[in-house]
Amino acid sequence: MVQLLKLFEAADLWGICLLAAAIYFVSLILYRLYVHPLSDVPGPKLAAITSWYETYYDLFKTPGGQYWNKLDELHNTYGPIIRINPNEVQIHDPEFYTQIYAGGPNKRNRYARSVSGNGSPGSMASAVSHDLHRLRRSSLNPFFSKAAVLRLEERIQSRVRILCERFSGFLERKEIVDVSVAMTSLTLDIITEYSFGESWNLMDRDDLSYDFIKVMRGGFETLQIRKLFNSVINLIPPKALDRLPKEETETQRLADEALVLITAGSETTSRALATIIYHVLENPDICTKLQQELDIAIPDATMEVSYSTLEALPYLTATIRESLRISALVPNRSLLTADQPLQYKQWSLNPGAYPSA
Ligand code: HEM
């Protein structure tokens, strides 16, 4: 009998929990649809209610990563401004671009949810507030000025020579080489040498370190999933760091920064290079024109050629720019919010709203 009573009590408890959850979700839905500051922004109701709408297109609809395609469709239906998930709006209007991504004295903060997935919370790329981002960025700025990058020229040239030797070897043995892997191997060898003073020398390995690069790319593919469950992952206390003195946790911040440098400095440039190689080889006209320009600028293939010489070649420059344009290297939305409301036509976007363009 006592056991039966306990069973009823447990059932009641479950009932109360279910009822509370139902009230919470219904209130949340009503709030997001009718009270939320973005409730008057056009867009699909489902997207306004839940970010699972976006998740469906990015994770479940084959071949995945399709929300940006869907957004084009939504702009055609709803106009230049749409609410694309509960807290985000997207504005398809070049005139408004510089208002969102405003420089100078205008302060812009990032959206924590959007930067949470990159796995490097201590890095500048994950800094949410404008001031923190500025502080972190200021320590690295001098290393990425044009003058600083030009000083790298000789080191970059020597890495390119290693790659050319590797290509000659593949050619002699009539082995197929995956150009995208070769380019990532090259860019990782360069950026690790620049960041850590010691290159990973991935190009030295027989397969150009294909397995390692495959694992690294797998990490990028989980980005959407990590973004989704980051709040759960953050509940797990960082035990290892808890036991360390405060100054030691700084190491973690530097490690986060290093991770960003490696990932941002390799796959982006490598993808741009692989895109150039693919399209130049696929289009004989482009290939011939480029070859003619390079033959004149570099009559002897064994000679060293400087960046300033290459920079002055119009067809090569156009080829690089076109690759940057078409290769969608960083396809995520860059969500920023201003300290003051941003006005787009009749819509006032408060600091709690995250617009992207
Ligand atoms: C074709 C090559 C590249 C493209 C198209 C590219 C593109 C971008 C874009 C669009 C962002 C902004 C991301 C955001 O805020 O959502 C970014 C950030 C960043 N990129 Fe690149 N990138 C390239 C190469 C590189 C290289 C070679 C490095 C060298 C390490 C690098 C380091 C970084 C860093 C550190 C950030 C974060 C900056 C910050 O938060 O202020 N990128 N990149």
Image (cartoon, grey):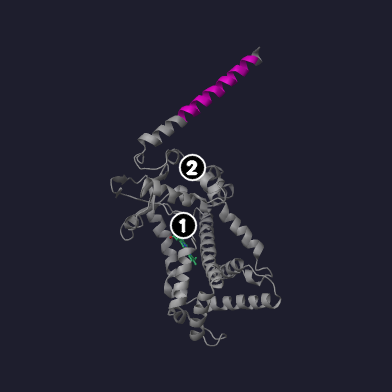
* Residue 68 screen position, x and y as percent: 47, 52
* Residue 334 screen position, x and y as percent: 43, 54
What mark, if any, has residue 293 been given in the picture? none
Give the residues in magenta: 4-24
**Residue at (50% x, 63% y) in the render:** 327
Q: Which residue is mark 2?
A: 53
Query: Is 237 inside the magenta-drawn segment?
Result: no
The secondary element bearing badge 2 is classed as helix
Whether ligand 1 has any atom under 8 Å from the Cβ at mark 1 is answered as yes
Q: Amino acid under label 2?
A: Tyr
Q: In this rendered view, identify the residue nearer to me: 133 or 185.
A: 185
Q: In this rendered view, identify the residue nearer to me: 14 or 77.
A: 77
Res. 143 visible in picture: no
Count of residue discs: 2
Q: In this rendered view, identify the residue nearer to me: 64 or 207.
A: 64
Characterize the local packing of mark 2: few (<14), some (14-19) or many (20 or more) Cα atoms within 10 angstroms.
Answer: some
The secondary element bearing badge 1 is classed as helix
Question: Is residue 301 shown above or below 229?
Answer: below
Q: Amino acid under label 1?
A: Ala
Name, please, the residue furthest toward the bottom: 300
Question: Is residue 344 shown above or below 198?
Answer: above
* Residue 344 screen position, x and y as percent: 30, 49
Q: If you read the primary sequence from the N terminus, does the residue marked by circle 2 or circle 1 appear first?
A: 2
**Residue at (37% x, 38% y) in the render:** 36
**Residue at (59% x, 49% y) in the render:** 240
Q: Which residue is mark 1?
A: 125
